[in-house]
């Protein structure tokens, strides 16, 4: 996912330099126009009925969408769908899957937003299918996470925070409200619809070829049955996409060093929204189509890719309801009772493989050798025993509040706590030289030290026998971004 930038001149101490910064709004990038030979690889998908506003009422699409300064569906048009939708069949208390679907988290990725609207259109149009789905699942659908970003066709919120990183630090009120809503809903399945930057040259010769990139959450701290089921869903999505003539691959970013292309799949740290959703011990899906900076080019194909993905996930969840529901619920129970060590640090394995690209010169598809950093079987470099609980002073009330927003059960000590604990003592703190998607991380090496502590009544106790316990672990590793507590 790409960060929009604009430039200005900065004069300091007689030095003149060009630096990059975000403006308050309208941080659009120039449109990248695919050549005719590249465009030939992305025809419309046949046999797909799109009932989102941009396709059902094309006269509502602003002319500025074509030049990349506006999205395809203005807010006034979206409001007929309402900001978020909870779809239920009215039968409370029955055993059902809870499925969260969101689009438009990044405002410059319009097919993700429109693809979720196309799903709502399908629900409204195909009542038999809708009844079938709602018999087995309750859905909370947030088609436009980042209203201001979509309005400006920029990645960030109006405040220039990246919502895909702010969900982990909860700086903005909007982020806190959405994350609290998600924690209350407690989804079994989470889907995050995005687009990626695919029009720029790679290694001076190639263009990204994949219509659809989808990744499951592969964090080794999540139950293995959930990870296996998550990948099974992705495999079914890829089969459906290929049957519709779409090119597919697990999500990756690409960098080039001395002419060598290295692709990297998402790592296991829960910094991005879809990875953070895995903390619920849920199936999670990062869905990306080739679309950033392409404006309206190949838009039907991009939106169709999202709709195919969403309907495949829903159909599998409903058609295999008993197996899916029991796998997730049993895995959650197993996780809360687990005494397995916690993976704190790891290294990704690097392998050789080939990936399909488009030859920019003639538009042909070519298999290109690359180095691949994979997350499937990483090398564990540090693990810790799972503590019974985390206990900390009421001086850190703000930490307790953030944990509760993230879905963690935090108890208040009714009496003083005295005992021997393992405390993570911060040795140094080093702020990153640059921000990544709006956040500058802090590296805090720690020493684990046994010590006797006394926490007065009114402090906080977080039992690790809960499905969201991994959220606490994220703040207690050797490379944390949050305050350290003590482990009991």
Image (cartoon, grey):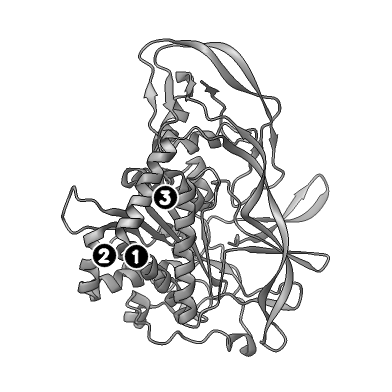
Where is mark 1, residue-wise?
314
Residue pictured at 58% horizontal, 62% vertical: 1
> Does residue 52 appear in the picture of this structure?
yes
Q: Looking at this view, is 433 or 467 the one in front?
A: 467
Residue 367 left/right relative to 404: right
Counting every numbered tag in the picture gives 3
Give yes or no for contact between labels 3 and 1 (Cβ–Cβ under 8 Å): no
| Above or below for 103 versus 52 | above
Kindly report the distance in space between the C-alpha atoms of the residues bearing marks 2 and 3: 19 Å
Q: Position of residue 230 (x, y in %)?
A: 46, 57
Residue pictured at 53% horizontal, 30% vertical: 386
| Above or below for 222 versus 56 | above
Kindly report the distance in space between the C-alpha atoms of the residues bearing marks 3 and 1: 15 Å
| Above or below for 396 versus 135 | above
Residue 81 left/right relative to 349: left
Q: Position of residue 329 (x, y in %)?
A: 35, 46
Q: Looking at this view, is 167 or 372 the one in front?
A: 372
State which quadrant residue 412 falls in: top left
Q: Looking at this view, is 135 or 187 the one in front?
A: 135
Which mark identifies residue 133? 2
Q: Residues within 10 Å of mark 2 (few under 14, many from 20)?
A: many
Q: Secondary structure at mark 3?
A: loop
Q: Position of residue 385 (x, y in %)?
A: 57, 29
Q: Residues within 10 Å of mark 1 (few under 14, many from 20)?
A: some
Q: Secondary structure at mark 1?
A: helix
Q: Secondary structure at mark 2?
A: helix
Q: Which of pointers 2 and 1 lies earlier in the amino acid sequence?
A: 2
Where is mark 3, residue-wise?
282
Give yes or no for contact between labels 2 and 1 (Cβ–Cβ under 8 Å): yes
Q: Which of pointers 3 and 1 lies earlier in the amino acid sequence?
A: 3
State which quadrant residue 310 falls in: bottom left
Q: Which of pointers 2 and 3 lies earlier in the amino acid sequence?
A: 2
């Amino acid at each position: 996912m790409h960060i929009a930038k604009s430039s200005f001149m900065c004069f300091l101490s007689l030095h003149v330099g060009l630096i990059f910064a975000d403006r308050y709004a309208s941080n659009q990038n120039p449109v990248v126009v695919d050549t005719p030979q590249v465009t030939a690889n992305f025809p419309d998908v046949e046999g797909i009925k799109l009932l989102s506003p941009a396709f059902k009422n094309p006269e509502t699409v602003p002319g500025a969408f074509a030049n990349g300064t506006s999205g395809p569906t203005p807010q006034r048009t979206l409001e007929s769908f309402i900001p978020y939708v909870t779809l239920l069949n009215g039968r409370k208390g029955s055993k059902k899957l809870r499925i969260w679907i969101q689009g438009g988290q990044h405002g410059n990725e319009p097919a993700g937003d429109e693809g979720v609207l196309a799903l709502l259109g399908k629900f409204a149009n195909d009542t038999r299918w809708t009844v079938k789905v709602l018999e087995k699942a309750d859905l909370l659908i947030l088609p436009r996470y980042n209203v201001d970003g979509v309005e400006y066709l920029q990645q960030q919120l109006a405040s220039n925070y990246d919502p895909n990183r702010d969900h982990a630090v909860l700086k903005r009120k909007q982020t806190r409200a959405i994350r609290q809503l998600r924690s209350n809903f407690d989804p079994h399945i989470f889907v995050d619809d995005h687009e990626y930057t695919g029009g720029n040259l790679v290694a001076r010769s190639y263009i990204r070829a994949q219509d659809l990139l989808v990744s499951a959450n592969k964090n080794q701290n999540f139950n293995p049955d959930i990870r296996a089921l998550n990948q099974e869903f992705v495999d079914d999505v890829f089969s459906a996409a290929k049957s519709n003539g779409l090119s597919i691959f697990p999500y990756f970013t690409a960098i080039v060093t001395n002419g060598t292309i290295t692709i990297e799949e998402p790592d296991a740290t829960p910094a991005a929204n879809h990875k953070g959703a895995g903390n619920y011990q849920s199936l999670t899906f990062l869905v990306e189509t080739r679309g950033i900076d392409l404006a309206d080019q190949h838009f039907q194909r991009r939106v169709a890719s999202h709709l195919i993905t969403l309907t495949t996930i829903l159909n599998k969840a409903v058609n295999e309801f008993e197996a899916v529901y029991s796998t997730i619920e049993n895995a959650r129970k197993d996780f809360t009772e687990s005494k397995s060590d916690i993976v704190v640090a790891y290294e990704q394995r690097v392998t050789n493989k080939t990936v399909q690209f488009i030859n920019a010169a003639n538009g042909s598809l070519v298999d290109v050798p690359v180095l691949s950093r994979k997350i499937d079987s990483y090398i564990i470099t540090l693990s810790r025993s799972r503590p019974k609980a985390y206990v900390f002073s009421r001086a850190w009330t703000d930490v307790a509040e953030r944990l509760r927003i993230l879905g963690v059960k935090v108890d208040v000590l009714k009496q003083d706590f005295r005992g021997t604990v393992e405390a993570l003592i911060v040795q140094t703190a080093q702020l990153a030289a640059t921000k990544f998607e709006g956040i500058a991380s802090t590296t805090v090496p720690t020493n684990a030290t046994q010590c006797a502590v006394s926490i007065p009544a009114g402090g906080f106790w977080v039992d690790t026998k809960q499905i969201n316990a991994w959220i606490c672990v994220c703040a207690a590793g050797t490379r944390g971004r949050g305050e350290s507590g003590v482990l009991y």
